[in-house]
């Protein structure tokens, strides 16, 4: 009898230890005190600041896209700011002492290579933007897009069949975009947030009809031409700059294999890898529909300087 009681006691003790060990990381990560260098930039069109960390609490104020706020604490779903609480999904947390860059991957999703890119991003807690082609999306690659979304990556619309928007009719270009919107939404529940026209080409009458921004690039790696991992790693790490948008393609093995070393080197160079929309918010640049952007720089000084940075 006594032996049995001892056994029960041991089991209870062990179970308690297990529960405590399992709960410790949840408790420890629940309410993180943050370094003074950390800010949040609003990535939603308008974000609400609530009086408490609850949707049912009062809305203290609304803050616009690109607004920077000092952040005190981070919990599972909320950032605590001066006046209250803001949803994590409405803002990006970033380190103002670091440089920021947006890596973009076109022409996927690829059943064979996109996963390698995602594994590398996950390892380095980095984010990227995937400019997908509608005709590549099926049940298998749709799952990869869901993973991209869960990881906080961004998905852009790169047309349905990689058509040249300079040689097709404007209504055909709109149809290319619409078909891709629909198939992305089918898998992720969300319409792509950005557009990247194939070959970076577009006529003004197509751009005018766009309900989102067109995103080009400032670092053209030509990974499709060289298909050489070593060259790609060298090219990206030597040409990276604060606010840059890098063009790569997640449909080549040589590119997919280069992503991990690229992330390692950029991390050592003091970069944070963010999505295109996050980069624009961090730089305080508002993304206008029908406008083309190639990189983002903080808008300081006179208006003429602003015009130089946005084209
Ligand atoms: Zn392309």
Image (spheres, rainbow, N blue to C red):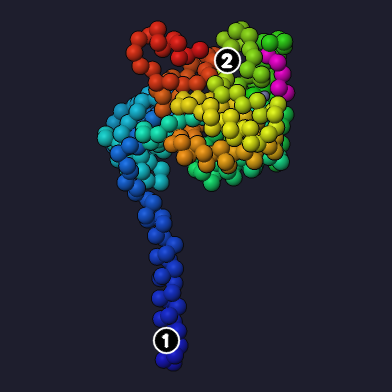
Image quadrant for the N terminus?
bottom left
Q: Which mark is residue 170?
A: none
Foreground: disc 1 or disc 2: 2
* Residue for badge 2: 210
The structure residue drawn at horizontal position 38% and vertical position 36%, both measured from the top left corner, is 95
Tell me where the magenta segment starts and ends, as one range.
161-165
Q: Is residue 145 left or right of residue 21?
A: right
In the image, farthest residue toward the bottom: 1
Coordinates of residue 310 in the picture (x, y in percent)? 47, 14
Q: Which mark is residue 5?
A: 1
CA–CA distance between discs 1 and 2? Answer: 73 Å
Q: Secondary structure at mark 2?
A: loop
The image quarter in which residue 225 lies: top right
Q: Nearer the viewer, residue 266 or 286?
A: 266
User: Is residue 12 rendered magenta in the image?
Assistant: no
Which callout, 1 or 2, points at the residue further toward the start of the chain? 1
Q: Is residue 203 left or right of residue 31?
A: right
Q: Nearer the viewer, residue 10 or 310?
A: 310
The structure residue drawn at horizontal position 31% and vertical position 34%, both measured from the top left corner, is 70
Location of ligand 1 given as a quarter of the image: top right
Placement of 268 over or under 107, stated as above or below: below
Coordinates of residue 82 in the picture (x, y in percent)? 26, 35
The image quarter in which residue 17 lies: bottom left
Placement of 174 over or under 148, stated as above or below: above
Placement of 191 over or under 26, stated as above or below: above
The structure residue drawn at horizontal position 38% and vertical position 17%, both measured from the top left corner, is 299
């Amino acid at each position: 009898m006594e032996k049995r009681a001892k056994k029960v006691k041991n089991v209870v003790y062990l179970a308690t230890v297990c529960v405590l060990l399992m709960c410790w990381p949840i408790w420890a990560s629940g309410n993180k005190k943050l370094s003074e260098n950390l800010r949040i930039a609003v990535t939603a069109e308008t974000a609400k600041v609530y009086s408490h960390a609850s949707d049912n609490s009062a809305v203290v104020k609304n803050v616009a896209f690109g607004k920077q706020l000092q952040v005190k604490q981070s919990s599972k779903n909320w950032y605590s700011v001066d006046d209250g609480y803001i949803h994590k999904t409405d803002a990006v947390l970033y380190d103002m002492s670091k440089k920021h860059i947006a890596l973009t991957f076109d022409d996927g999703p690829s059943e064979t290579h996109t996963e390698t890119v995602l594994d590398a991003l996950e390892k380095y807690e980095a984010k990227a933007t995937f400019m997908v082609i509608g005709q590549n999306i099926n049940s298998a690659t749709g799952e990869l897009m869901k993973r991209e979304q869960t990881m906080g990556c961004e998905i852009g619309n790169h047309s349905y069949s990689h058509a040249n928007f300079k040689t097709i009719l404007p209504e055909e270009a709109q149809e290319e975009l619409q078909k891709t919107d629909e198939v992305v939404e089918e898998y992720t529940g969300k319409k792509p947030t950005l557009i990247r026209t194939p070959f970076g080409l577009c006529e003004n009458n197509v751009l005018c009809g766009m309900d989102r921004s067109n995103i080009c690039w400032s670092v053209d790696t030509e990974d499709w031409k060289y298909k050489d991992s070593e060259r790609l790693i060298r090219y990206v790490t030597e040409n990276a700059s604060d606010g840059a948008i890098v063009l790569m393609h997640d449909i080549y093995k040589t590119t997919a294999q280069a992503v991990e070393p690229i992330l390692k080197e950029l991390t050592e160079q003091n970069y944070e890898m963010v999505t295109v929309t996050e980069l624009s918010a961090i730089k305080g640049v508002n993304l206008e529909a029908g406008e083309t952007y190639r990189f983002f720089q903080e808008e300081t000084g006179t208006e003429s300087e602003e015009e130089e940075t946005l084209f």
